Image (cartoon, rainbow, N blue to C red):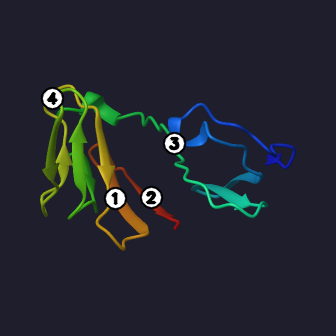
Amino acid sequence: LDFNKVTAGKGTNNSWESGCYNVKLILDISITGDALTTILNIHNTGKEAFPFEALFHTYYSIDDHSAMDGSKCFVKGLEGYNAYDQLTKRNKMIGSEPITIDSELDSIHTPPDGIYIADLLIGVGATETIKLVCSGK
């Protein structure tokens, strides 16, 4: 999908309200063999720098109804990230243990300063995992 026509877009975020920015967005989705790849390119076509975030809200089907079993359902690779729990309004630093689900969960994970790549392993069942790699600056 090429959102080349998205230029001089004015966002609703407070940081965007003061002006318009020229931007080109390209979302590339490919499926090959056993891989699904999505690439979002955001190119500033104007002269003024602007802040932005891109979020993919991804949902995975968990085999065997094992979402609450930390040996089967987990996320590894976020060591050193700050996690803001939107339910409790608390921050915590992610250690070396995998992230598991033992109750309702709604967290935002922020990488340490200077880290622009994430290489994650996501457990989605007894023997199934998904590898997720993303980068950007």
Location of mark 3 (residue): 56
Q: Amino acid at mark 3?
A: Phe
Q: Are marks 2 and 1 in contact (CB under 8 Å)?
A: yes
Work out whether residue 44 or residue 30 is closer to the camera in this orientation and state it: 44
Q: Are marks 2 and 4 in contact (CB under 8 Å)?
A: no
Q: Position of residue 27 (x, y in %)?
A: 71, 50
Q: Residues within 10 Å of mark 4 (few under 14, many from 20)?
A: few
What residue is at 33 percent from the left and 52 percent from the top? 122
Q: Is there any visible trace of residue 70 in the rendered image?
A: no
Residue 90 appears left or right of 4:
left
Separation of marks 2 and 1 at Cα, in angstroms:
6 Å
The answer to which of marks 4 and 3 sits earlier in the sequence is: 3
Q: Is there any visible trace of residue 81 in the rendered image?
A: yes
Location of mark 4 (residue): 88
Kindly report which numbered mark, 3 or 2, lies closer to the viewer in this rendering.
3
What residue is at 54 percent from the left and 47 percent from the top? 54
Q: Are marks 1 and 3 in contact (CB under 8 Å)?
A: no
Point out the residue furthest to the bottom here: 114
Separation of marks 2 and 4 at Cα, in angstroms:
27 Å
Residue 121: assigned label: 1
